[in-house]
Amino acid sequence: MISIMIAISKFKYLILVPFILFISCSVGAPIDEYSAEVWKSPNGGSINYRYRLPYKVEEGKKYPMLFFLHGAGGRGADNKGQLLDANSIDAFKSQNLFSNYNSYVFAGQVPEKEQWVNVDWGSSEHKMPKISNSMEKILEALDSFIMDSDNQVDIDRIYIMGLSMGGYGVWDAIQRRPNFFAAAVPICGGGDKSMAKSLINIPIWAWHGDQDQVINVLRSREMNLAIKRLGGSPKYTEVIGRGHDVWLDVWTADDLWKWLYSQSR
């Protein structure tokens, strides 16, 4: 399914976005509501991550998880930027992920100068490269968290969402693990069209702004079409008049969040 939206407002110049983020991150959900951890890989190296528990956890029950991949603006070493980037922390609060959906949220942080996927964001296409250091480490951390008996994650309801650099990360992760995630929401990203066959059974809802000057809207259009041609049924929303910051529409799309949390493997 393809849907078209018209952006009520848009920011034509990317330089405005950091200012908007600075203002919006000064209020809202406190970062300290998310526990800060460092995953130390048995293969060497580490990666920062934060997680938050569901609102109410009862013994013997399992709960869904949102696995979130931030954009380039969230890179660093403070173990905060991954949730402050694009104001995702307030979006998760406004959608009541913890009370309405009783969900975990898990978000890693890419170090400066690294990427979730080592590709040129301005390219018209790419082939899936060797797994990046950051992607390898965060998937290790995610696996460890899920397998920890102290956590009660429903392995049939793990959802992946990411924007911009993280949008590429979503496509990359589901291509590497096509049977792992219950649903995926890649926001203004791009994937490897030759891997579309492996994605036909995954519930996907991709988003992109038609005026995106950072990542070409064709990246999302072509992934959507490639999966459809092979028998899949992905959802795709292209927001008319919106630039790179199409996540603003995602944050307020109640139907998307209801759809996402209704999915199960």
Image (cartoon, grey):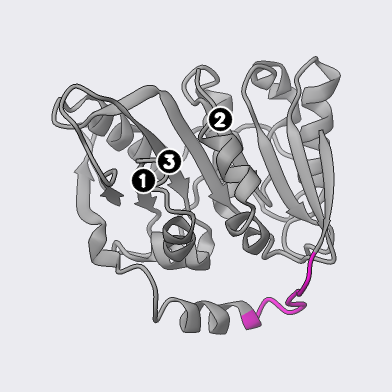
Label drawn at residue 159: none
Q: How crowded is mark 3: few (under 14 residues within 10 Å), some or many (20 or more)?
A: many
Q: What amino acid type should be assigned to the residue bearing mark 2?
A: Ala
Question: Between disc 2 and disc 3, whose residue precedes?
Answer: 3
Task: From this view, report whether residue 155 is shown above or below residue 160.
Answer: above
In the image, residue 217 lies in the stretch drawn in magenta: no
Q: What element carries label 1?
A: strand
Predominant SS of the magenta segment: loop
Q: Mark 2 points at which residue?
A: 183
Q: What is the number of the mark on residue 105? A: 1
> Which element carries disc 2, helix, strand or loop?
strand
Choose the circle earlier in sequence order: 3 or 1: 3
Q: What stretch is highlighted in magenta?
A: 7-16
Q: Nearer the viewer, residue 173 or 52?
A: 52
State the mark number for residue 66: 3
- Residue 212 drawn at (x, y percent): 78, 62
